[in-house]
Amino acid sequence: MRVLVLGGGGREHALCWKIAQSPDCEALFCAPGNAGTAQLATPLTLDLLDHAAVAAACGTHGIDLVVIGPEAPLVDGLADSLRRRGVAVFGPSAAAARLEGSKAFANAFMARHGVPTARSWDFTDGAALRAHLQTCPIPVVIKADGLAAGKGVVVATDRAMALEAARAMTEERRFGAAADVVVVEEFLPGEEASVFALVDDDGVVLLQPLQDHKRRFDGDEGPNTGGMGAYTPVPALDAALLARVRETIIEPMARGLAQEGMCYRGVLYAGLMLTPDGPKVVEFNVRFGDPECQPLLMALQSDLLPLLTATARSELASAAAPVFVPGAALCVVLVAEGYPGSYPRGREIRGLDTVQGDDVVVFHAGTRSGPDGQVLTSGGRVLGVTARGDDVAAAQARAYVAIDTLHFDGMGFRRDIASRALARE
Ligand code: AMP
Ligand code: GLY
């Protein structure tokens, strides 16, 4: 098969890394990619907003399967455009991608299909929003309805913070049109975990659960980021609980999508809170998480490509189940100085050649090739150092040993990735 991966972060490098190992993969392309994907896949220059150009490239290169990594082209309808032109695509329709593109839509969809989540209220009027926040129970969660790069959510621990979050969204317009609707949710207590499920017209396949680390600093301090590290499996989400997630969340969602005629052939990412009343949905994404994709694919022993193909063709019901390695895998993200605020680019990365072995891989996120063959930073999240081991401790030790050999000016990372699982071990 000839495969085209769209996107340019750590998730896409991990996808290319795994797909390239498949005996079914005959040729691999990536657009726009990064310095890491360029080692595995032929880079293509494509504007993902130009659907006709992407379709034309598929024709030129004889592409059999397109894998769409990030949410923006999905919300923009790229999967629909390609499918209309007869291209097999791993990625949901624009109609279904609203599960990520609009939190109000996702909440209403869950309500229609009886999927457990937080109680929520939508506001388009600043005064009504303020009035609600004056009297609601605290803590309370305030969300911009639309896409805000993971930054549009405030968990307010006192009323002043809640009102300030509302002001930033409605008056200062910090998230622009993404906060035309502001969603207020009841606060759900518990431990967070994520479940990724492959979903097509009549099948679901659950993958191994993961846990992300969203805050910038150790001990879950500091600002929210796109993700500072992740690990799999999650001891708090055992087989019994996972069966409950399948029954109460994933299957009703898949049925609901089919009933409402929204084509879903991709991965559904359920961000969950494991509350005392059972697992409840905190958010949906319509793509693999980043960095979660990196440890997930390192832990996946069986071939990924047949699963992606089966999803794109809606043949999941008859696909072989995925097999995961025993033990654990984790990813530690190396970020630029200042991330998640503004940060410099163009810093040289050293030590990439020193990391070797089957059980540790450095996935590139924000990197590009320099003029003299060096690798330079070009984003906030720069690298994802991903390792597997017989247990969490072994995987963690392997990742941090590799990090000691890597360097770029201003490099930062968390030292406590997977510490919750380690505590349980
Ligand atoms: P989201 O982008 O919707 O996943 O929200 C970002 C983070 O905010 C989540 O990972 C949770 O830590 C937290 N969060 C969101 N919604 C809730 C909620 N209803 N209750 C508690 N925490 C929440
Ligand atoms: N790491 C969180 C996400 O991909 O949304």
Image (cartoon, grey):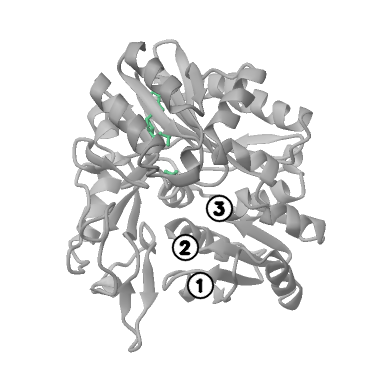
Counting residues from the start of the chain, the first of labels 1 and 3 encountered is: 1
Residue flagged by tag 1: what amino acid is it?
Answer: Leu
Q: Residue furthest bottom?
A: 372
Left or right, 63 with reference to 296: right
Contact (Cβ within 8 Å) of mark 1 with mark 2: yes
Q: Which mark is residue 40?
A: 1
Q: Which mark is residue 13?
A: 2
User: Disc 3 or 2, which lies upstream in sequence?
Assistant: 2
Q: Which residue is mark 3?
A: 72
Q: Nearer the viewer, mark 1 or mark 3?
A: 3
- Name the N-terminal-most of marks 1 and 2: 2
The Cα atoms of the two marked residues, 3 and 2, are separated by 18 Å
Inspect the image, locate mark 3, and give the three-letter code of the amino acid beneath it. Answer: Ala
> Can residue 148 be seen at all in this image of the molecule?
yes
Query: Ligand 1 lies in which image quarter?
Result: top left
Circle 2: residue type: His
Tell me the quarter of the picture where residue 162 sits.
top left
Q: CA distance from mark 1 to mark 3?
A: 24 Å
